[in-house]
Amino acid sequence: MLRKRAKFSLFALQFSAFRIVPPAALITIALSKGRIFDEAVPLLAAAGVATSEDPETSRKLILSTNRSDVRVIIVRATDVPTYVQYGAADVGVAGKDVLDEHGGRGLYQPLDLKIARCRMMVAVKEGFDYQQAVRQGARLRVATKYVQTAREHFAGKGMHVDLIRLYGSMELAPLVGLAEAIVDLVSTGHTLKANGLCAVEEIAPVSARLIINQAALKLKRDAVQPLLDAFGRAIA
């Protein structure tokens, strides 16, 4: 029995010597393609981080960087908070619109990065009297992918609305009679104007936030804090 235990202990020791243990200090940053990534690049540079490839031209979803302790993963904008919440990423950059829909559970949101700025708006077809509909207490159909945001906004106004969830081409809904209004992000307003719509009410300004997994902030503080500090200096 002693011989078997000794043999097992020796095997365990040999096996442990060959295990691949991921470095505790490796930081994974979750970003989405497009405007947020483009505007986050200078902030990453301020923290001494540069990706090895451009996500717009590369098909890779995990990008190495010039730092061995930092990598970037490319995910859908709506999925960034989920990756950070469950620890698949330590840090991420997500729009306030996405965070409001997600709910922010398990996330630390220390910084408004002041990038990817736009506005969450109510828009209607030109010629539709939205203010009169509000005064008369009309029950409107509202198309949006920001259902939680829209629900809270109209509830706060004491309005009863029927929310219709869509995932794209929001401007089409009032034009074909699917809805009287939409709730969507508006940057320049050019797309609304081109489709015969106009913004009638601002719900909230929107910009991108730095988000951090709460456990990572505790367990990897020595690695995460310098990133947080660098981002903070860059936007000051």
Image (tube, rainbow, N blue to C red):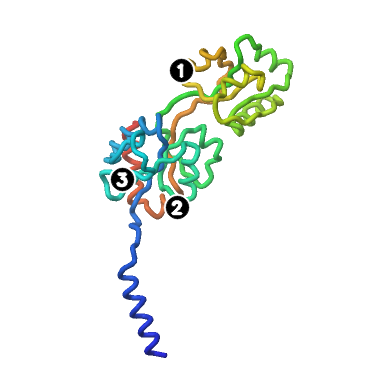
Query: Count the marks: how many?
Result: 3
Q: Name the residue under label 2.
A: 215
> Amino acid under label 2?
Ala
Q: Which of 118 and 16 is in front in this view?
A: 16
| Picture layout, residue 221 above or below residue 156 | below
> Amino acid under label 3?
Ser
Q: Nearer the viewer, residue 81 or 174?
A: 174
Residue visible at 40% across and 44% down in the picture: 91
Q: Which mark is residue 160?
A: none
Query: Badge 2 local density, few (<14 within 10 Å), some, or many (20+)?
Result: some
| Disc nearer the start of the sequence (2/1) | 1
| Disc nearer the start of the sequence (3/2) | 3
Q: Which of marks 3 and 1 is in front?
A: 3
Residue visible at 62% across and 18% down in the picture: 174
| Disc nearer the start of the sequence (3/1) | 3
Quadrant position of the N terminus in the picture: bottom left
Residue visible at 49% across and 50% down in the picture: 86
User: Taking 45 as reference, is 127 left or right?
Assistant: right
Please state the horizontal and vertical placement of residue 210, each as a whole percent of the image. 42, 38
Q: Residue 64 carries which label?
A: 3
Q: Gap in Å between the C-alphas at discs 3 and 1?
A: 34 Å
| Disc 3 element | strand
Residue visible at 45% across and 29% down in the picture: 207
Please state the horizontal and vertical placement of residue 22, each as a whole percent of the image. 35, 58
| Disc 2 element | helix
> Amino acid under label 1?
Thr
When asked about the image quadrant of residue 45, the answer is top left
Please state the horizontal and vertical placement of residue 52, each as a whole percent of the image. 28, 41
Q: Residue 188 carries which label?
A: 1
Q: Gap in Å between the C-alphas at discs 3 and 2?
A: 23 Å
